[in-house]
Image: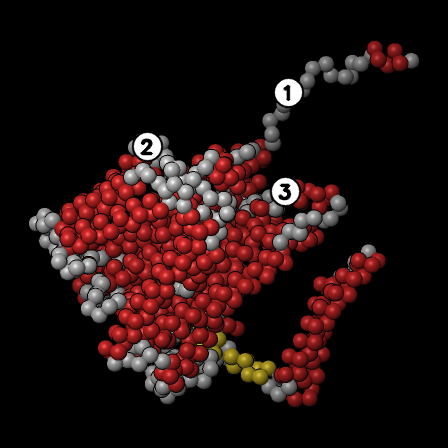
C-alpha cells in the first residue's frame, strides 16, 4: 500500500523552483518609499507632517540667503528697498552679502592695526601647523608636537600678538627682575634639596630637574622681553575671531592641567584635599558663566592690591579658565573612574610612588579615554566665548554687534544677515569638532571592546 | 600622597636613609596642613586687599544697601513693584522672573525634547532625518546667538505696534509682544478649584486602592479611565453648580485691536518670548539626545521578554521600557534643567529683567556695590544648584537598581 503511493510521485517536483524576484513594489525606490515613508496610514501622516515642516523652514532660508540675496554693492542703498532709500523693490527681504564682505576683515581681526595683521595670520598658521598633526592619530612625533603646542606656540603667539618686549618688575628685593629671579631659583632648589635630604634621597636628580626647568622658564621670559621691533598692540583693539579663538584656546589649555589636578584631588584619600577640590568644582559648576564674567570684570580689580591692574581680556580669560577647569575636572574624573582598580593596584605592587603611578599608568589611560569628553567641553567653551560680549569685549559676535552702529550699511536686513553668517560660522566650527569627537569615540571603542 | 598603605614606612630612592617623612601618613598630614595654610592665607590676602580697596573708594561693606530705594522701573514684575521700592524687592522681582522663565522653559524644552528624541528613533525616514538635523543644527550654535536671532531677527518680522497678527482664540501677536486672553475669575471660582483638587486626590486614592487589589486578587482595574472620569465629573458638576448659584465662574478677556495697537488681555513681553523660545529649543536638542540614549539603553531583550510573558505593546512600554529608560534619562535631564536655569542669565543680553539683569546689572551699576550684589547673585544660583543636586541624590538612591 505504501509502495504504490511512493512509486507514483509524478506530481512532486524534482528540481527546486528558481527564486522569483521580489514584487516590484517592495524593491527599488518605490519599495524604499513604501517601507520608510508610507508603511501605514500613521506613517504617511508623519511623512506629510515632516514634509510640511521642511517646506516651512527650508525654502525661506534658501530664498533669504541665496535667491533674494544681494551680492554686490557699495553701501546701504544696495540692500534697502525704495521706500527705505535704496534701489530694491518694496517688500524685498534678503541677505546683504556685500556688507559681510566689507566687514569681513573686522570680523576676523577686530580693530587690530592694519599693518600688523600679518602677525595674526602667522599665529593662525602656526596654530594650524601644530593642531592638524595632533588631531591625526597616526601622525608621528606626538611628543614633539605636544611640546610645540604647549611651549613654542604659546610663546610665539604671545610675542606676535602683543608685540613682545615685556618689562618685568622686581618681586622680592627690588633690585631688578633677574636678580630676584636668581634668588627665587636658589630658594626653590634649596627646598627641593632639603626635602631630598629629609627623606633620605642621595641622588641630585630632582634638584637638577628643578634647576633646569627654572632655567628654561628664564629663557622663555628672556625671549618675551626682547625687543624684536614689533609694534605694541593693546588687547582692547583685538577683536573678532581672533578674540574668540584666543579665549577658547587659552581657556582649554589652562583648564586641562588645572582640571587634572582637581580631579586627582577629588579622588584623593586626604579628606581636606578632597573637600577643597569638591568645594572648588561645585562652586564653579553651580554658577552661570555670566556671573563669573561679571565677577572677573568688576570684582577681580578689588581683589588685587592697589595699583595692580589687569587688562580686560586677561580678566575674562582668568574667569573662563577657572570656570572650565571645574567642568574639565569632572570629565577627567570620569576617566579616572573608568580605569580598573587592577591598574592602580598593579602600579602600587611594582613600587611606584603616587606621582609615578599617576603620570605613567593612570593619566595616559584616563586621558585617552576622555578625549571625546574633552572635545565636548571645548565645544561648550567655544560656544560660551560669545558671552564675553556682555562684559564689553569684542569677540566674533561682539564685533558683529558693534558693526550695526555704522550708518554705511544700516538696513533692516543687516542684523539678520550678520546673525545668519555668524550662525553658519559657529556651526561649521562646532559641527567639525563634534564629528571629530565622534570619530575618536569610535576609534577608542573598538580598542576597548571585550 | 595617598594613604592607602598607611603606617608602612617606605624606603625611597637610593635607600640609604630612613625618615619619618617617608611615612605616607605623615606626608599626607603635612601636605594637608600646607594646603590649609595656603588656602587660608590666599583667602586672607584677597579679603584684606578687597577691604583696603573698598576703604580707598569710601565704600562700606554691608548688606544694608538692600533696604535703600532702587529708583528704576522694571517692565515685567510678578509681584508689586514701584520705582520707590527697595533693592531687596528688586532682588525678589529678578529672582521670580528667573524662576518664571526657567519653569516655562523646562516644560517647553521637555515636551519638545521628548518629541524630537522619539522622532529621531522613528522608522519614518523623513521624520528621523528632520529630527537629526534639528539636533545637529541647534546644538552647534551658541545659545547667545540663538537668543539674538529669535529676538532681533525672527520676532522683528512680526507686525508693527499698531497692527497685530490675529491668533483667534490665542489672542493677538505683534512686535510689542503676545497679547493673550486673560482669565477673569468670577465669584465661586475657588469652589471649582477645590473640587478639582479633591478629584485629583481621589485619583491617587483610586490608583493606590487598585494597586492593592491587583496585588491581592490579580484583578486589574481601569485606573486611567476612572481618573479621567472622576476629574471630568468633578469639573462639570462644580461648574454647573457655581454657574447656577453665582453665574459664570470664569470669563476670558480678549485683547482688541484699537487705533494704537492691541489693548487688554495679558501681555507677554517680546524679551520673555525670545528668551523662552531660544532657551527651550536649544535645551530641547540636548534633551532629545538624552531621551534617545535612554531608550536605546534598554536592551531589546527586555521587550522580547515582556512579549513572551504575554504583555501587549502598551503595557510593555509603560511597565517595562519607560521605567528602565527613565533611570538613565532622569540624571542628565536634571542637569539640563539646571543648565537651562543658569543659561537664563543670558537674559541680560536682551534686557529681560531676570536676576542677573536687574540685580547684578542695573542695581549694581547704580550703587557700585559689586561685592555684595555679585555675592548674593552667585549664592542664589549656588543654592538652586545645591537644592537640585540634593534632589538628584535622593532620586538616584530611590531609583538605583537594588541588587540582591
The mark lying in front, picked from 2 and 1, is: 2
The residue that label 3 is drawn on is B300
Relative depth, front residue between A169 and A428: A169
On screen, residue A76 versus residue A28, left or right, reads left
Relative depth, front residue between A222 and B128: A222
Residue B162 position by quadrant: bottom left
On screen, residue A115 versus residue A109, left or right, reads left
The residue that label 1 is drawn on is A18
Residue B385 appears at what percent x and percent y?
48, 65
The mark lying in front, picked from 3 and 2, is: 2
Residue A347 appears at what percent x and percent y?
47, 37
* Chain letter belonging to callout 3: B
Residue A88 visible, this angle: no
Count numbered badges in the picture: 3
Residue A391 appears at what percent x and percent y?
29, 66
Residue A141 appears at what percent x and percent y?
30, 32
Query: In the rendered view, would you say A89 is above or below A28?
Result: below
The residue that label 2 is drawn on is A139
Relative depth, front residue between A396 and A311: A311
Q: CA distance from mark 3 to mark 1?
A: 36 Å
Amino acid at each position: 500500500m505504501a509502495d504504490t503511493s511512493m512509486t507514483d510521485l509524478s506530481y512532486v517536483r524534482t528540481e527546486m523552483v528558481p527564486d522569483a524576484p521580489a514584487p516590484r513594489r517592495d524593491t527599488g525606490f518605490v519599495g524604499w518609499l513604501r517601507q520608510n515613508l508610507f508603511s501605514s496610514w500613521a506613517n504617511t501622516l508623519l511623512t506629510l507632517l515632516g514634509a510640511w515642516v521642511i517646506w516651512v523652514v527650508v525654502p525661506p532660508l534658501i530664498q533669504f540667503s541665496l535667491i533674494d540675496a544681494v551680492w554686490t554693492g557699495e553701501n546701504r542703498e544696495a540692500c534697502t528697498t525704495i521706500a527705505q532709500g535704496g534701489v530694491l523693490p518694496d517688500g524685498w527681504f534678503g541677505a546683504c552679502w556685500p556688507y559681510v564682505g566689507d566687514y569681513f576683515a573686522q570680523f576676523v581681526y577686530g580693530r587690530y592695526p592694519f599693518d600688523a595683521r600679518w602677525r595674526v595670520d602667522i599665529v593662525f598658521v602656526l596654530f594650524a601647523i601644530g593642531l592638524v598633526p595632533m588631531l591625526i592619530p597616526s601622525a608621528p612625533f606626538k611628543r614633539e608636537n605636544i611640546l610645540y603646542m604647549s611651549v613654542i606656540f604659546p610663546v610665539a603667539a604671545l610675542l606676535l600678538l602683543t608685540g613682545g618686549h615685556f618689562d618685568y618688575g622686581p618681586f622680592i628685593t627690588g633690585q631688578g627682575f633677574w636678580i630676584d629671579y636668581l634668588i627665587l631659583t636658589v630658594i626653590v632648589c634649596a627646598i627641593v634639596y632639603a626635602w631630598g635630604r629629609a627623606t633620605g634621597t642621595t641622588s641630585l636628580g630632582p634638584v637638577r630637574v628643578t634647576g633646569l626647568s627654572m632655567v628654561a622658564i628664564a629663557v622663555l621670559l628672556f625671549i618675551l622681553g626682547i625687543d624684536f621691533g614689533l609694534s605694541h598692540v593693546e588687547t582692547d583693539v583685538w577683536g573678532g575671531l581672533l578674540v574668540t579663538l584666543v579665549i577658547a584656546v587659552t581657556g582649554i589649555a589652562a583648564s586641562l592641567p588645572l582640571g587634572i589636578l582637581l580631579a586627582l584631588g577629588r579622588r584623593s584619600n586626604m579628606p581636606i584635599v578632597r573637600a577643597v577640590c569638591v568645594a572648588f568644582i561645585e562652586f564653579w559648576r553651580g554658577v552661570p558663566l555670566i556671573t563669573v564674567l561679571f565677577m572677573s570684570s568688576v570684582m577681580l580689580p578689588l581683589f588685587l592690591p592697589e595699583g595692580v591692574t589687569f587688562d580686560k581680556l586677561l580678566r575674562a580669560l582668568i574667569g573662563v579658565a577657572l570656570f572650565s577647569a571645574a567642568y574639565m575636572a569632572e570629565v577627567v574624573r570620569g576617566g579616572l573612574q573608568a580605569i580598573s582598580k587592577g591598574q592602580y593596584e598593579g602600579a602600587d605592587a611594582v613600587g611606584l610612588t603616587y606621582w609615578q603611578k599617576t603620570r605613567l599608568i593612570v593619566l595616559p589611560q584616563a586621558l585617552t579615554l576622555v578625549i571625546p569628553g574633552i572635545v565636548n567641553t571645548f565645544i561648550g567653551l567655544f560656544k560660551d566665548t560669545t558671552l564675553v560680549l556682555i562684559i564689553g569685549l569684542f569677540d566674533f559676535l561682539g564685533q558683529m554687534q558693534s558693526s550695526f552702529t555704522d550708518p554705511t550699511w544700516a538696513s533692516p536686513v543687516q542684523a539678520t544677515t550678520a546673525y545668519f553668517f555668524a550662525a553658519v560660522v559657529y556651526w561649521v566650527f562646532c559641527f567639525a569638532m563634534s564629528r571629530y569627537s565622534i570619530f575618536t569615540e569610535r576609534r577608542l571603542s573598538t580598542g576597548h571592546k571585550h | 600622597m595617598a594613604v592607602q598603605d598607611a603606617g608602612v614606612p617606605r624606603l625611597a630612592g637610593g635607600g640609604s636613609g630612613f625618615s619619618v617623612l617617608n611615612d605616607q601618613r605623615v606626608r599626607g598630614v603635612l601636605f594637608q596642613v600646607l594646603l590649609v595654610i595656603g588656602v587660608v592665607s590666599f583667602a586672607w590676602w584677597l579679603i584684606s586687599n578687597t577691604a583696603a580697596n573698598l576703604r580707598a573708594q569710601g565704600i562700606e561693606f554691608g548688606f544694608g544697601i538692600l533696604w535703600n530705594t532702587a529708583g528704576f522701573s522694571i517692565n515685567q514684575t510678578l509681584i508689586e513693584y514701584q520705582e520707590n521700592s527697595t533693592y531687596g524687592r528688586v532682588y525678589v522681582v529678578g529672582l521670580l522672573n528667573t524662576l518664571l522663565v526657567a519653569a516655562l522653559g523646562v516644560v517647553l524644552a521637555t515636551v519638545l525634547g521628548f518629541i524630537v528624541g522619539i522622532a529621531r528613533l522613528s522608522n519614518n525616514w523623513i521624520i528621523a532625518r528632520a529630527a537629526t538635523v534639528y539636533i545637529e543644527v541647534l546644538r552647534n550654535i551658541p545659545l547667545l546667538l540663538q537668543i539674538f536671532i529669535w529676538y532681533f531677527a525672527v520676532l522683528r518680522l512680526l507686525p508693527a505696534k499698531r497692527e497685530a497678527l490675529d491668533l483667534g482664540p490665542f489672542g493677538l501677536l505683534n512686535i510689542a509682544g503676545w497679547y493673550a486672553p486673560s482669565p477673569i475669575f468670577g465669584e465661586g471660582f475657588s469652589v471649582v478649584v477645590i473640587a478639582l483638587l479633591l478629584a485629583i486626590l481621589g485619583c491617587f486614592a483610586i490608583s493606590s486602592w487598585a494597586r492593592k487589589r491587583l496585588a491581592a486578587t490579580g484583578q486589574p482595574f481601569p485606573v486611567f479611565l476612572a481618573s479621567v472620569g472622576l476629574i471630568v465629573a468633578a469639573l462639570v458638576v462644580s461648574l454647573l453648580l457655581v454657574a447656577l448659584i453665582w453665574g459664570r465662574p470664569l470669563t476670558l478677556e480678549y485683547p482688541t485691536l484699537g487705533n494704537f495697537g492691541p489693548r487688554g488681555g495679558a501681555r507677554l513681553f517680546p524679551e520673555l518670548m525670545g528668551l523662552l523660545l531660544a532657551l527651550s529649543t536649544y535645551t530641547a536638542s540636548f534633551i532629545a539626545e538624552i531621551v534617545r540614549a535612554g531608550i536605546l539603553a534598554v536592551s531589546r531583550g527586555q521587550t522580547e521578554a515582556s512579549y513572551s510573558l504575554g504583555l501587549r505593546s502598551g503595557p510593555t512600554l509603560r511597565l517595562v521600557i519607560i521605567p528602565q529608560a527613565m533611570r538613565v534619562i532622569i540624571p542628565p535631564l536634571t542637569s539640563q534643567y539646571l543648565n537651562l536655569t543658569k543659561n537664563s542669565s543670558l537674559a541680560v543680553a536682551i534686557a529681560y529683567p531676570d536676576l542677573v539683569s536687574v540685580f547684578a546689572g542695573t542695581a549694581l551699576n547704580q550703587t557700585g556695590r559689586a561685592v555684595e550684589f555679585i555675592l548674593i547673585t552667585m549664592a542664589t544660583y549656588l543654592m538652586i544648584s545645591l537644592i537640585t543636586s540634593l534632589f538628584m541624590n535622593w532620586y538616584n538612591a530611590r531609583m538605583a537598581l537594588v541588587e540582591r
